[in-house]
Structures are given as structure tokens and as C-alpha cells.
Image: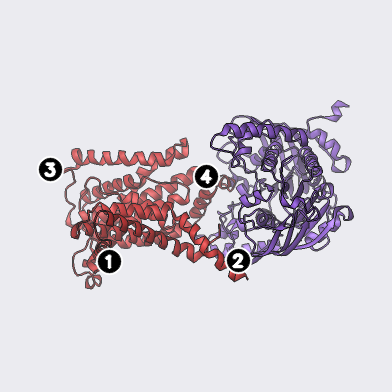
Amino acid sequence: MTGDTNVGRQETAAPAIELRGISKAFGSVQANKDISIKVARGTIHGIIGENGAGKSTLMSILYGFYRADAGEILIHGRPTQIPDSQAAIRAGIGMVFQHFKLVNTFTVLENVILGAEDGPLLRPSLSKARKVLQDLARDYELDVDPDALVEDLSVGHQQRVEILKALYRQADILILDEPTGVLTPDEADHLFRILRGLKDQGKTIIIITHKLREIMEITDTVSVMRRGQMTATVKTAETSPEQLAELMVGRKVLLDVAKTPATPGRTILEVKGLRVRDEHGVERVKGIDLHIRAGEILGIAGVAGNGQSELIEVLGGIMKGSGTVLLNGEPLDLSGRASDAESRREKGVAHVPEDRQHLGMILDFTAWENLAFGYQGDPAYHRNAILMDNDAMMQEALGKMERFDVRPPIPTLQGKSFSGGNQQKIILAREIERNPDLLLVGQPTRGVDIGAIEFIHKRIVELRDAGKAVLLVSVELDEIMSLSDRIAVMFDGRIMGERDPDQTNERELGLLMAGVDNETAA
Amino acid sequence: MTKLPVWADVVLVPLISLLLAGAISALVILGIGGSPWEALTTMVDGALGSPYAWGYTLYYATSFIFTGLAVTVAFHAAMFNIGGEGQAQLGGLGVALACLFIPWPHWSLALLGAATGAALFGAAWAMIPAWMQAKRGSHIVITTIMFNYIGAALIIYLLVYVLRPVGQMDPATANFPPSTHLPTLNQIPGLNLIFTKKVPANVSLFVALIACYLVWVLLWRTQLGYELRAFGKSQEAAKYAGISGTKIIMVSMLISGALAGLMSINNVMGESGRLLQNSSEGAGFIGIAVALMGRNHPVGVLLAAILFGFLYQGGAELGLWTSIPIELRTVVQGLVILFTGALDQMVRMMLGLVFRPARKLEAA
């Protein structure tokens, strides 16, 4: 339907993509080492690996962002040079990035033709695109209102626009980087239906992910990367999540969290009638009551955007709110002078924010600077009344990086040089080692690889076992269910109900997350 | 884009940008019928060729160090302080008041007092835009520009109606008393062996050098500097870390204004010995270029200030000794700012192409 008559079409035996001996180094870091892989036409091929394993580098080489130091790329059997993304598009490769590259204030149609206009006048391109979009919507369930502004679309729809962009450019090889990272379970299911439809039409799809469940569900073949090398390529039907996890990490991985039953003590946090308005005056938290005791993890489940972020931010001193919050029996200031994050830390609240790159750290700061972030007033970091003690901060950073297995353990590297998992370990090291009474954790393992997830979960449980209170907010239901001692479900700024993780299931929680209270309904 | 090695980024990029600016300047000089070679030798001779020439270059550089540091401090807090001109002129008022109305027994005490006055007045002039930014969200670029004009008008009013001695024709204050005269380099024991003729560069130069060091300490060795840089990189993250945005905006702008004001101890107190209108003579704006070229680092600011001192002094020499008009120095400065500030990404990209194959060989 794309009218694509790529030369490779005749050589049906040739794989859609073949990489031979691809190597790429950044300075002393070998990001890709002698990688060879064949992706058969008309299949869905998964590439998994921990953060920093070299998946993204490999795909960037394929899409022309980087040039390989050595190696060959064959598209449909023909050696192809891909010096830039234009060449990749000409070769029939389309890429859907993890962070969408859309103009928010343009309509869907305008975004689709952006960079692929047929001439100086937009109208012919727009009407052509409208027609193509209609066909695509019909064929693949890819329906999006072509005249909607991108900023008004949900994340799932924005992703469809990205896919439409690639298809409009006649891509027959589609690369998706962590496509479900931002999607709700429903949206992910829809995406998978779309991808299966595309596969049935002969498109080749490469999915980069670290979620094993998705790999098992959607792919035909899966390649595992570890430390820049391709460690295995296996048929999905012939493998198991445990085996893949082991291949990724290089050792056996516990996919479930090992923890003993909680032994809750006194109440540490008590929240009564908490309300939070955002900067537009919209009420996001509409009267919440909850409590957490010492030695207990309270998990907040919910679809993103139902007030969980605001709840954690008001407790962390980033947003203002109203109501009553008692910490160790003492009221917290929710809107006055002592409602800032510094005052919260002084009272023993530590906060691992949901958005680690924008809130939790300064990407341009070094690791040792980031490991003191938020605690820069601590006398231990000061030589005297005027000067900070950079040596002491450096020493402490070395210890924290070692204890939390931050890789590479180099305190002088900038925050942005670390992978997502290691950034998260830096933040956790900083917050947990403060030995707080209450730890607020938002999306602790979002975008974090399996090896690190296991580590992070273990540390959170350890803090609980040390008699601290933990408030966990996560959109990953698996995570909530395996970590929490109690689960509260939030919907539309309210708590829909509380459940015992051992006596509930995903279906029940899913209904609560959708705002259906099955107890009252029954 | 290929990432350049640090040395290429810090040394090569500004150097090539400068050469490009020089080349275009040469074309302009050719175009107006002058000789680029003659211009170059005149400038080098007149600005760097003798201790006497250096005495002028360093005098200008001193002013540019102060205004460059002013822009640097604000920049690290993501505040673009365009108001150096106004803050420097108000600083001049602080110097004049301190020198005229307080009887100082010795120049060193006078320097201390005048520096305090300069810093206070400069800071005060930066405070209003800072407050409007912090509390009302009025954009600092717009308000500081406006305050340059208000400041200039205020100074002219004060010079004409308030501070002008009776019977004097020009809008200026009376001459400062002799006890406030700062030693110039040729009056300092030891240095007088090098600087044998009277030069305008004075002890303010050493104050400027100390200011460079203190700004470095402030930014990279104090909690305030840490918070200021964190706020400058991400206001959201700063909030998470409990850093008050209002405090950082106010404090960074006050320090910035104080530094801009401090330049007046060099020109108003050290050189003219009285306050004239438009005392800053564009140094506030040049500070922006100096900070840009100096990568907002005190060492870079020091080097860039000397370069601009050279351009300023050398340009003046052009007007004196050649048929090339003095206005050309503005053209050359403009080109230097264009290439080092606005177009250095272009140079970096070109260098990236040069470094790419080199890296490939290393890897092979």
C-alpha cells in the first residue's frame, strides 16, 4: 500500500536488516562491540538489554545518528550507507522514539507532513496526507483525529502520530524505542494490535524494551544485549522470562521481591482531608485520608494523572496544599513558610521524585554534587561558615556509589552520563542513606533495567525492615503488588479503596483504578 | 555532532572564531581603502607594544573584568543581566558621593569607602528588576534594559541640577579631593620601573583580580554558589532541593549589580576623578561579550577582558595614526562578538568534522 518497490523485494530470502560486525566506541567506552544480527522480513524482533547495554546506540547507528566505527549494514540484502536520518528514511526505516518528536502546537496532519512536504504550498500535501491517514486508520486501527492539536492528544495517541509519520514516509522497517514506557495497560494492548496488523502486512518491526512481559507477548524473535555485545538471539516461543533475564544481567535474577511480612509499629504519617490545587487552580487531590506506620510500605496504585504525583509532591514540599498532615504526631506546614522541601528534609522526610531527571538531580552537575543535592546545607558538607567541603562530599560520594553499586563509580562524571538505572541509584543512595522516617518514592523503577530493579526493590524493603515508613507511588501494578504491604488505589484525586496485596488481584485493582468500586457495586 | 576534546573546545574554538572575526575585519578595512596589515600593526603596537600601551589596555580590561563578572554571576543563575550599563553608572554615583562628601585621610580608605558605595548603588539598581522578576515574573532582560535608560537619565538630572558645582558649564561633579586619587601603575613602587610614563591603569586592576578569585570561590566553593548554579540549571529541581527561587534571583542579581557598579572605582575614581555623564561608555554591554567569550568562568572572563581591552585601545590608536576612522573599532568588536558569541557553534561544527576522522583512526 505504500507503493514501495525496494530492490530488496525480489530477494525475498534476504533479511530486512542485517548488521555485520558493528562496533562503536565513545572515548574509552565500547558501546557496541562486533554486533551481528539478522532481522527477518515480516517479523517482530525484540531487542532487550539493561540500560547502557548498547541498544540505543545500535539503533542510533541504524537510524544515522551515529556512524559505526566498523561494520556493515545491509538492508534487504544490499549494503547500505546510513550517514544521516534522511538516508535511513530513504532506506525505508522509520523510528518511533521514546520521547516523541512532535510539534505540540501543530495538528496531527501538520506533524505528519512536517519535513515530508511535496512542495512550497501546504494544501496539496495536507489533503494527500489526509487521504493516506484515512487508509492507515482503517487498515491498522491507527485512528487519530487528523485536525486535533498534538498537545490535546493522550500519550497513546501521540505515539500513534509518530507511527503514522513513519508510515507516511513509506517505512517498511519500524523501530520502536521503549514504546510502552508511557502507556497505560490498555493503550499498550492497542499498540500491540496495531503492530500485529503491520506485521501481517509484511512490515518488519524492531522493538527495544526491557520489559520481559512485552517481549514474550509480542515478539517472534528476541536478541539480548549485554555490555555492548549481542549475547543471544532466540525464538521467543522457545525461551522464558527467567532465561531472558539471566541472559540480560548475566546471572540469575529474582523477578519477585523477597520480603517477610510487615511488622508495623507506631503511626508515622497521618493524612486527613488533604487537598491540593495545581497552578491552574484545578483541584488534583480532593480530600485524602491515609496513614502509614513504621515498618510498612503503602503502595498507591492508579492510572497516571489521578493525583498521585500531587500527593507525593505536597508531602515532599514541592506543592502547597490544605488539610492536616501529621508526621510523628506533629503537624506539617502545608502552605506557609515551612512548607518547602528543605523543611521537610529537616523533619525526616526523604523524597525520590517521579521525574528523576527534571526534579531529582541536576543533569549537568557531577555525581558528587548530585549526591548532596537537597542536603547542601548539611554541616558535614561545610569546611567553615563560608566554604563547602568538596573533598568531604567527594569522599562520601565514593562510599555511596560503592554501596549502591552505581556504575561507573566515578564521582566526577556528570549526572547525564549515567544510565537511567544508575541515576536512580544515585538518588536512592542520597535519600535512603539519610535514614529518613518517611521515604516518598515515585516510580522507583521507571525506565530502569532489571538488574537495577531488583537492587532498588531490595533497598526499599530494607528501609522498611529498619522500621521506617515508605509511601510508594507507581503506575506499574506488578511493582505495587509485590512491594506494598497495603495498597491504596487513587482515582480522580480520591482514594477509591484500600486492599491487602495478598487478597486482591490485578482485575480488582484495575476496576478501582478505573473508578469502579466493586464493593459498593456488588 | 562529534563531541570535541576539552582543549579544542576551550582553546581552539575561541581562537578560530577570533581569526575569522579578524579576517572579516581585514576585508572591511580593505573595503574602505585601508591597509589591514597597517591596521593590525598599529593596533598591536598601540595596545601591546610597550608598557605604556599596556597601561591603557589594562585600564580598559579592568572595567571589562568587573562587568564581565557581573554578567557571569547572573548567568549561572539563568538571569541575563543586560543592565550592566545602568548599574555601572549608578555605581559611579556611589563613588562620587563617597569621594565628595566624606573626608578620607588616605586613598586606601577612600578606595574601600568608594568601592562600598559603588557596590551598594550598583546592587540597588539591580534590585528593582530582580524583585520584579522574582515576584511578578517581569522578564529580567526587558527590565534591566529599561533601567539602563532610567539610570542614565537619573544621572544626567543629578549632574545638571544637583551635583554640578555653581558656575561650572559641563554636567559633571566637582573634582574629587586629592586624597581620593588612586595610585596608577606608574606610581606603585616596583611597577614604576616597568611603567615609566603615566598610564590610566590603577590599583583597581588588583581589586578586579581579587574579584575574579572571589567569584570563582562563590560559584564553586560555597553553598550559595551551589544553589545558584542548581537554580540556573533547573528551577524545578531547585525547588525539589528546597532552594528558594526568590532568594537566588535576588541574591544573584544583587551580586551582579554590585560587580557592575564596582567598575566605577576604575574609571570614575581611578581615571577621571569626577563623575561625568555616560561614565560607563558601553563597558556594561561589552561585559556581556566578555562573559560569553569567557564561557562564564572567571579565568575566561579575565582573558576575554584583556582581549577586549586590546581591541578598545588598539581601535583608538587606529583613529589616531591611520586614516581608518575610530568607529571601525566598533565594527571589529561587533565581529568578535558575532563570531565568539553567536557563531561559535558554527566553528564547533566545522571542528567536529575535522575531529571525526581523527577519532576513527584512534579507534581502529
Residue placed under numbered mark 3 in the picture? B169
Which chain does red denote in the image? B
Q: Earlier in the sequence, mark 1 or mark 4?
A: 1
Q: Which residue is mark 1?
A: B48
Instruction: State yes or no: discs 2 and 3 in contact (Cβ < 8 Å).
Output: no
Q: CA distance from mark 1 to mark 2?
A: 41 Å
- Identify the amino acid type marked 3: Met
- Amino acid type for the residue under numbered disc 2: Gly
Distance between the alpha carbons at the discs numbered 1 and 3: 37 Å
Question: Do the CB atoms of the residues marked 1 and 3 lie less than 8 Å apart?
Answer: no
Quadrant where the C terminus of chain B lies?
bottom right
Query: Which of label 1 and label 4 is nearer to you?
Result: 1
Which residue carries the number 4 mark?
Answer: B244
Q: Answer yes or no: is residue A49 visible.
A: yes
| Residue A253 appears in the figure | no
Amino acid on which disc 1 is placed: Leu
Task: Pick out the residue farthest to the left.
Answer: B167
Chain to which mark 1 belongs:
B
Q: Is residue B237 left or right of residue A251?
A: left
In primary-sequence order, the first of circles 1 and 3 is 1
Viewer-side residue, B297 vs A425: B297
Instruction: Find residue B273 and name its label.
Output: none
